[in-house]
Image (cartoon, rainbow, N blue to C red):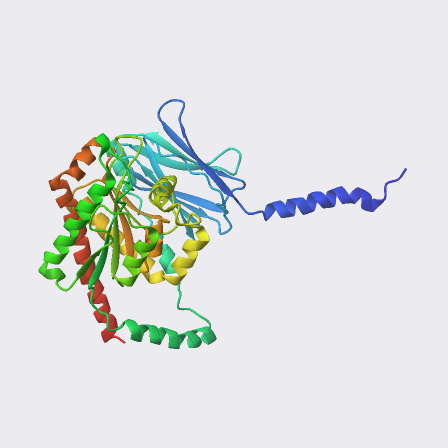
Amino acid sequence: MRIPLFSRALPLLFIFLFSCVSSYAQTQLYRVSNTARSDGMGYVIRFHQTAPVDSFEVLQPAPDLIQMVLYDEEIDTTGLQLPEQSEKLKEVRLYKLEYGYGIDIYLADDAYYQSKGYIDQNGSDILVGLEVSTQREVNRFSQQFLARNWYQELVASENLFELPLERSEASRPLQDNYYNNVKDKLRFDKIVIDPGHGGWDPGSIGYKGVKEKDITLAVAKRLGEYIQNSPEMEGVEVVYTREDDTYLGLAELGHFANIAEGDLYISIHCNSFHNQYARGAEVYFLGLHKSDASFEVMKRENSVFKNEVDKQLTEEDLLIYELAHTGYIATSEKMAYMIEDQFKNRAQRKSRGVKQAGFQVLFEASMPAVLVELGFITNPSEQRFLTSDYGQTIMASALFRAVRNYKVEYEEKQAYSATSN
């Protein structure tokens, strides 16, 4: 029996079509894992992918920071699983860029490894090998690299003013009206301070039963006093979301912040972790969480509002917020770094960096807003510091200096804008 030519060619056609579809399939980065080497001389971080990326690059600009660039515009990170925080690997963050992804891998301060990237034998996964080294050798090794600023690249790639002519002309009256409405408000004259938690909500419970709500209220009041008593901050009104041990729900927080028409919103909190050795301050501004660690902090701080909101903030919610409040996001980020600089360089506190997460309190504030984690009250040493008069003075002073510097830059920028228009 002779098989028709078309029937014989059909399987080959399916194979050809399948190979074509496969060759154009989107690469999915679905997991990042961390495994200790069998010889005890380091670790291997694996980026699990369904297909290889176009190319990649591994940098180590600092002993505790490894950066990667994945060059592939079609990488899908939906459902990505990131490794849990460990003794040596602290955090992995991803940044969506125009040409692919930027990745920050944060190591512990006392971890000294030299990094090297290579393709796994399967041809798709990327491996980052961390080999044990000395502090001197790692310092020397990292000097050959220049750190990549992902935030700067994100801003540079988003030219929001290059609109088609008809859209640009149509939107000009709106832009003019907006400018006319705000150009007279050139002074920084109101700050909203939110001492986290309160009333029936104690916040985190720390070492020996210390309550987060008591520390946040004490530091918030001290910050407010510094602002009100400073000649440099004359005319600046301080609005507290609470001034005693009371609980304010999400609606009240939004009311205080937005009705007050503040120029800046600072929400003050304390961190906690099951490992009593975790320490350091963190500063957050609103955005998509970049790590499991940020996500856990976000869940804890949002949990108090679980009966007042229908759901956690989604990626779509945050993207819509960013589109509507582009200037607030950028300014919030700048303020976050100013606070982090004061904590790290003036107060001499360990900094865990500036991060993004979807906090409800920040989402409700229609103004530049940051959330500060002063430290870990589950760490006995930091608990003693944060409950002491000295420690609260140090942290409130650092926040004050950041606010004061922000006010100066804010008013200089507003004055320049007014004279140049």
Q: Residue at x 29, y 42 (%)?
A: 200
Residue 152 is at least partly visible in this image: no
Q: Quadrant of residue 369?
A: bottom left
The quadrant of the picture occupied by the N terminus is: top right
Q: Residue at x 34, y 31 (%)?
A: 86
> What residue occupies the far right of the structure in this picture?
1
The quadrant of the picture occupied by the C terminus is: bottom left
Of 253 and 126, nearer the camera is: 253
Q: Position of residue 186 (x, y in %)?
A: 22, 69
> What residue occupies the far top of the structure in this picture?
39
Q: Residue at x 45, y 54 (%)?
A: 316
Of 412 and 178, nearer the camera is: 178
Q: Establish if 385 lies above or below 69.
A: above
Q: Quadrant of residue 171?
A: bottom left
Of 108 and 404, nearer the camera is: 404
Residue 187 is at least partly visible in this image: yes
Q: Position of residue 38 (x, y in %)?
A: 41, 23
